[in-house]
């Protein structure tokens, strides 16, 4: 299986960041860990779920037409 072509999240860029803490269901954490493993296999660089979350959220927000239509504050 060519995992790289099946994952929506591509290679991760290096960005400035800030720390944010949140709680999630155990099942979501397990899925995030699984996705991180697949991402590492696809792109040859080990990442953990915590590293992937901001990029996943960014992708969801970028794809949300309703959110994009709202005026920026």
Image (spheres, grey):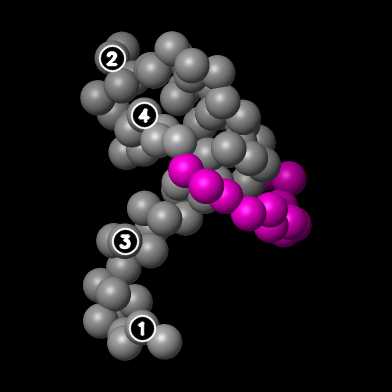
Q: Residues within 10 Å of mark 3 (few under 14, many from 20)?
A: few
Q: What are the residue bounds of the magenta stretch?
A: 15-27
Q: Is residue 60 magenta-colored?
A: no
Does 68 sit left or right of 23 as displayed?
A: left
In terms of image quadrants, where is residue 11? top left
User: Which residue has dot 2 on it?
Assistant: 2
Mark closest to the chain's N terminus, 2 or 1: 2
Q: What kind of secondary structure does the magenta stretch mostly adopt? A: loop
Mark closest to the chain's N terminus, 1 or 3: 3
In the rendered view, tell whether residue 72 sits above or below residue 22.
below
Residue shown at the point (29%, 61%) measured from the top left: 63
Mark closest to the chain's N terminus, 1 or 4: 4
User: Which residue has dot 4 on it?
Assistant: 11
CB under 8 Å between callouts 1 and 4? Answer: no
Residue shown at the point (40%, 35%) measured from the top left: 13
Task: Classify mark 4: helix, strand or loop.
Answer: loop
Mark closest to the chain's N terminus, 2 or 3: 2
- Mark 2 to mark 3 CA distance (whole Å): 25 Å
For the image, the number of numbered tags is: 4
Does 48 sit left or right of 54 as displayed?
A: right
Residue shown at the point (56%, 25%) measured from the top left: 47
Label disc, if present, on residue 72 of the rendered structure = 1
- Mark 2 to mark 4 CA distance (whole Å): 15 Å
């Amino acid at each position: 299986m060519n995992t790289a072509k099946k994952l929506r999240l591509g290679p991760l860029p290096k960005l400035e960041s800030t720390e944010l803490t949140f709680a999630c269901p155990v099942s979501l954490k397990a899925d995030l860990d699984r996705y991180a493993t697949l991402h590492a296999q696809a792109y040859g660089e080990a990442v953990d779920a915590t590293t992937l979350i901001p990029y996943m959220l960014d992708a969801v927000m970028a794809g949300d037409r309703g959110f994009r239509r709202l005026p920026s504050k």
